[in-house]
Amino acid sequence: MTLAEMILASHSHREKVAPGEFLDVDIDMVLSNDITGPIAIKEFTKIGLERVFDPQKVVMVPDHFTPNKDIASAEQAKMVREFCNQQGCHYFEVGRVGIEHVLLHEQGLVLPGEVIIGADSHTCTYGALGAFATGMGSTDIATAMATGKIWMKVPPTIRFNYHGTPGRWVSGKDYILYAIGDIGVDGALYSVMEFGGEAIDNLSLEGRFTMANMAIEAGAKAGLFYADQKTVEYASSRTERSFTVYKPDPCAEYARVIEYDVSDIEPQVAFPHLPSNTRPVSQAGNIKIDQSVIGSCTNGRIEDLRVAASVMEGKEVDHRVRCIIIPGSQDVYLQALKEGLIETFIRSGCSVSTPTCGPCLGGHMGILASGEKAIATTNRNFVGRMGSPKSEVYLSNPAVAAASALTGRITSPENL
């Protein structure tokens, strides 16, 4: 069996499962946020139950419109807060909150070998830990909060092997953008993307979280990594709960196996309006930008801020560019303060935000006007994703986003 099949078999009390089979799967964590949570709460109420199946396995994170930007978002957050207080679920208020897909693994709420579902498509982030994590609709989440189970079809698995040694400014963001550009936004539709190879073995956990996060941008059900020693050490440092590490069989059957040499990959830029519309940064041309966003659940971790700060150190953001830095969590923010990264950003002319999804979904803290262009370390660049439908979003890694903020146009850090 593949890694995903092993996890699903263990959670459905089966010795073996195969693609196409339908399963009742036990779940270890149910997630929702301030947009999707209220819908799930309303549907849960319709079921007529008074209590969730296990409050320790339900978490709600108000991260999309918080701190609340208006009355409507305040009412959304209030509903989530009151439900969690009543049920005893995990809940993170402003001041303790982080972007959900940075916060949960920091808090040790999601672990290797688990099944995690969330009413957010980027729940697949936790596949970096060797967990089966996937996004579902709010009504599915309501049912899961009531029963502790989900009903699903076993997806086929595509194996992606990355070999070679990357260049200086190449990261996990570039690995996944390159793959999405290769197979397309539907290239892994309802499949698992299983990542491996020596380049993955050498990749940091931050880089793996970035890759797993964007598996959905290729249409994948989940993106999984084997939980190696660095993963086990990370998870063990975050919780005292026990967990199980699964490893794919050497003879596992894959729908397809794709090989990449990362030595041939340079920093990638996804042009509007699809994450698959990628090209090397050296071929970006002369694209002037109005905004640079560095952060989000894709690239808002401490490694990402370190890279961006190393590019910006002693330099100034172009006066025509708004550069917004968004740490992924309070822990990341505090660590960045201790390391002097926040001072570097502010001296360079950046705005530093409290942890929030903010501009990534066109929520707040950086909405684009008609005709404006932004480069961002976020995960989607659909029409109107960051504001006006007449704006444009270009996706990149933190180094490219930082370099572009300094020059006012999409730039490789090699050119500074």
Image (tube, helix red, strand yellow):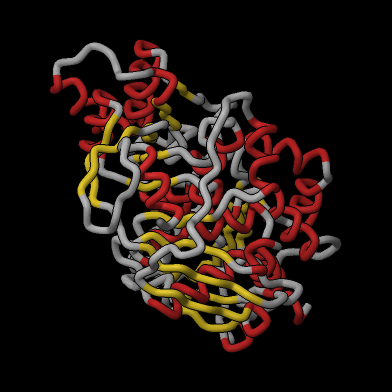
Q: Residue 41: percent from the left, percent from the top? A: 26, 26
- Asked whether the viewer can see residue 234, the reply is yes
| Above or below, comparing residue 292 to residue 143 in the picture | below
Q: Residue 299: percent from the left, percent from the top? A: 59, 55
286, 126: nearer the viewer = 126
121, 93: nearer the viewer = 121
Would you say 156 lies left or right of 365 here?
Answer: left
Instruction: Please report the residue visible at 29 percent of the width from the left and 61 percent of the height from the top.
Output: 190
Splitting the image into 4 quarters, where does residue 412 fall? bottom right
| Above or below, comparing residue 245 to residue 192 in the picture | above
Splitting the image into 4 quarters, where does residue 256 fall? bottom left
Splitting the image into 4 quarters, where does residue 54 fall? top left
Q: Residue 334: percent from the left, percent from the top? A: 73, 36
The image quadrant where one finds the N terminus is bottom left
| Above or below, comparing residue 305 to residue 413 in the picture | above
- Asked whether the viewer can see residue 319, the reply is no
Q: Residue 106: percent from the left, percent from the top? A: 61, 36
The image quadrant where one finds the C terminus is bottom right
Total tally of numbered discs in the picture: 0
Give the residue at the far right of this rendering. 314
Instruction: Please report the residue visible at 33 percent of the width from the left and 18 percent of the height from the top.
Output: 83
Instruction: Please report the residue visible at 39 percent of the width from the left and 66 percent of the height from the top.
Output: 253
Would you say 321 lies left or right of 339 here?
Answer: left
